[in-house]
């Protein structure tokens, strides 16, 4: 037992279940009882309630004249526990009595192992039984109804992450048993998917149109792939980490995604031949593949999936969670559809609208490109004027869904080169479309090239250099709010968020443009509207100087994806290539892009929150990085006194439950 503690399987198990390495293990030494000493002996395993459905009925199996090993090895088929009543009624009655006693003592469903030696019952072990999400909810609700536990205790009985299985399609359990795992990647977005392999977003869209179910396989995805991603059953990428484009976008859509499968496997993709080779298994375009975004497993062929279903206990259970939590839960949403989805799952606001995601649609990207190739302010403004109505329309759609709940709109963030083509044929086509020479477009692309784009010309730097972008975005935000206010007779307070600030003066600079533009529009419309201008804290320097920034900013939202990237100094898109080796050598235990690194990045968050509140006590504090939907990170956010967490729509129920558990365990 001690040796097995450090084997690779145990290490993977610990990582999956977030069990710290330092906890070690324990061994229980006890006297042997012999289940293999004749026909009045035997051994078995039983649960006090059904671990799959939660039904209150003893469930289990046993084997006569056998030891535990025989049950585990599956050489003989065990009998259902109810048969023991006929075979050895006294033993059975005693077992039923003991099982009942154990459940009332532990006040939870028990998973018990027992041995019968010569007609005597020996209990070997009991523990709180593992259970499906469905069973967990039913057992929690039943125990409250039976007067065994309180609502608060019930809230602590369901693993937040387990809720995933209720919200996404899952593989059929029986079908999965026969399937062979051929590779593994990061479990980037939960659920299960099965479909035909396609290698480009365009093919995904086309195949989908003709009624095929597809899994999109890419080296990595980019914003251009969005339409193909939307119609795919699942997304598999060779590169990338837990906050890479594919992971973030898939999570937002609620689509199954396995990322970075080439980080730890032998994987070769050939886009020309349309093949992917995973550890020697070659898939051609159109071959079936199955992937599991909850485990990261990759399978050959078709595995049947079962759709997510309504759960009768979920709403009641979540109402208890909402009663006890102190953190608000917002959603990250870029479209009215995402906003609706988040709202249906209980989001109380929007913590992040990534406006750049609105620019990639076919009808808008041209104007965006015109803006980028413009070599003077007037041309840039002309292009921006074309984008304005689209942007304003999107904001109106989001406001219509959210009403007066806070909506935080983040200004343009990515480096501009992301909007330009890379392939020669596309460059030619787009230059023609824009009415410029190929050479000119090439020059723009070259001029935008950066060795380190994530630390380059992006975020608020774009608006510092081109304030007209901030003017256009502010116009869209304020006009949209005014229109929806009028239409619905409500009072929206827009939250404008400036990204990637590292110095208070750059924030002030952009804010001046925002305020001037917003105030002029509000005055002209003759309405009385308040708005807030805040920033993301995603650069270490911003955290270090949070007291200065808070004098100017109405709110902070911790962008822990970039904050993690910049604090560790490794790329959120590429770190997967070496992180496995860090786990193997116990340098890191968990992926810092999935679970907030509380000792380092968390210290910056805590410090910035404290410094910020010292300068401005009413400062709003939230998080909108991917950690906002991770249960242990949510607990941390509760402890350091944030007001809200924001996460992708499908993680909203998880965050609500995690926030409730954090509040029950550490009331503030
Ligand atoms: C972040 O950096 O945490 C964030 C939310 O912004 P993005 O992921 O868009 O960089
Ligand atoms: Mg960021």
Image (cartoon, grey):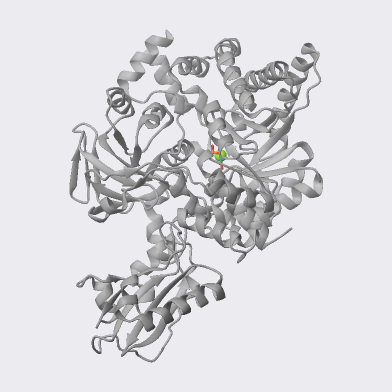
Q: Residue at x 33, y 48 (%)?
A: 171
Q: Quadrant of ligand 2?
A: top right
* 407 or 61, nearer to the observer: 61
In the depicted structure, whether residue 416 falls above or below residue 51:
above
Task: Name the residue located 25 percent from the left edge and 86 percent from the top edge.
Answer: 36
Task: Give the percent coordinates (x, y) of residue 215.
Answer: 30, 36
Question: In the shown orientation, is residue 328 left or right of residue 222?
Answer: right
Image quadrant in which the N terminus is located: bottom left
* Relative horizontal placement of residue 52, taking residue 476 as reference (left or right): left
Q: Position of residue 503 (x, y in %)?
A: 69, 39
Locate residue 205 relative to residue 623 in the image: left or right: left
Q: How many marks?
A: 0
- Viewer-proximal residue among 89 and 78: 89
Q: Quadrant where the C terminus lies? A: bottom right
Q: Nearer the viewer, residue 48 or 228?
A: 48
Q: With respect to residue 79, does 274 lie above or below?
A: above
Residue lying at the far top of the rendered structure = 435
Decide: is 6 above or below 39. Answer: above
Would you say residue 98 is visible in this rendering? yes
Q: Give the quadrant of residue 150.
A: bottom right
């Amino acid at each position: 037992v001690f040796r097995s503690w450090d084997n690779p399987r145990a290490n993977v198990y610990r990582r999956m279940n977030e069990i710290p390495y330092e906890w070690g293990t324990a061994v229980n030494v006890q006297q042997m009882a012999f289940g293999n000493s004749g026909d009045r002996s035997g051994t078995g395993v039983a649960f006090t309630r059904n671990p799959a459905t939660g039904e209150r009925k003893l469930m289990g199996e046993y084997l006569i004249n056998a030891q535990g090993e025989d049950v585990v090895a599956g050489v003989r088929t065990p009998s259902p526990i109810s048969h023991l009543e006929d075979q050895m009624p006294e033993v059975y009655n005693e077992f039923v009595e003991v099982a009942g006693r154990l459940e009332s003592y532990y006040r939870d469903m028990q998973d018990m192992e027992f041995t019968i030696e010569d007609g005597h019952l020996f209990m070997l072990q009991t523990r709180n039984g593992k259970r499906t999400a469905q069973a967990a909810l039913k057992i929690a609700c039943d125990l409250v109804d039976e007067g065994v536990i309180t609502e608060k205790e019930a809230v602590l009985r369901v693993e937040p992450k387990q809720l995933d299985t209720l919200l996404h399609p899952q593989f059929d359990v029986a079908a999965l048993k026969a399937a062979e795992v051929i590779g593994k990647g990061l479990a980037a977005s939960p659920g299960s998917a099965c479909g035909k392999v396609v290698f480009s977003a365009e093919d995904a869209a086309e195949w989908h149109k003709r009624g095929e179910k597809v899994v999109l396989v890419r080296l990595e995805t980019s914003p251009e792939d969005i339409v193909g991603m939307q119609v795919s059953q699942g997304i598999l990428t060779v590169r990338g980490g837990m906050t890479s484009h594919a992971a973030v976008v898939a999570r937002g859509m609620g689509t199954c995604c396995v990322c970075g499968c080439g980080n730890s496997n032998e994987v070769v993709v050939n886009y020309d031949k349309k093949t992917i080779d995973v550890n020697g298994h070659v898939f051609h375009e159109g071959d079936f593949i199955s992937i599991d975004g909850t485990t990261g497993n990759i399978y050959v062929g078709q595995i049947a999936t079962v759709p997510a279903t309504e759960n009768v206990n979920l709403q009641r259970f979540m109402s208890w969670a909402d009663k006890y939590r102190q953190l608000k839960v917002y959603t990250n949403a870029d479209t009215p559809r995402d906003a609706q989805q988040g709202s249906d799952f209980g989001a109380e606001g929007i913590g992040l609208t990534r406006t750049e995601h609105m620019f990639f649609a076919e009808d808008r990207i041209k104007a965006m490109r015109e803006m980028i190739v413009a070599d003077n302010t007037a041309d840039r403004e002309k292009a921006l004027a074309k984008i304005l109505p689209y942007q304003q329309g999107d904001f109106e759609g989001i406001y219509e869904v959210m009403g007066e709940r806070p909506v935080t709109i983040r200004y343009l963030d990515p480096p501009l080169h992301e909007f330009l083509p890379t392939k020669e044929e596309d460059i030619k086509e787009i230059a023609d479309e824009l009415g410029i020479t190929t050479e000119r477009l090439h020059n723009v692309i070259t001029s935008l090239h950066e060795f380190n784009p994530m630390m380059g010309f992006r975020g608020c730097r774009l608006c510092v250099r081109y304030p007209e972008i901030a003017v256009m975005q502010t116009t869209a935000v304020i006009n949209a709010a005014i229109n929806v206010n009028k239409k619905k007779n409500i009072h929206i307070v827009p939250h404008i968020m400036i990204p990637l600030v590292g110095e208070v003066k750059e924030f002030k600079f952009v804010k001046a443009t925002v305020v001037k533009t917003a105030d002029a529009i509000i005055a002209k419309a003759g309405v009385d509207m308040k708005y807030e201008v805040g920033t993301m804290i995603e650069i270490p320097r911003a955290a270090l100087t949070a007291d200065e920034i808070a004098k100017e900013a109405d709110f902070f939202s911790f962008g822990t994806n970039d904050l993690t990237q910049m604090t560790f100094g490794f790329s959120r898109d590429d770190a997967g290539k070496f992180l496995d080796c860090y786990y193997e050598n116990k340098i890191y235990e968990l992926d810092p892009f999935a679970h907030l690194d509380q000792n380092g990045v968390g210290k910056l968050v805590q410090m910035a929150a404290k410094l910020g509140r010292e300068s401005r006590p009413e400062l709003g504090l939230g998080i909108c990085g991917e950690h906002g939907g991770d249960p242990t990170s949510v607990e941390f956010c509760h402890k350091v006194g944030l007001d809200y967490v924001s996460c992708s729509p499908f993680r909203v129920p998880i965050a609500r439950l995690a926030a409730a558990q954090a509040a029950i365990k550490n009331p503030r």
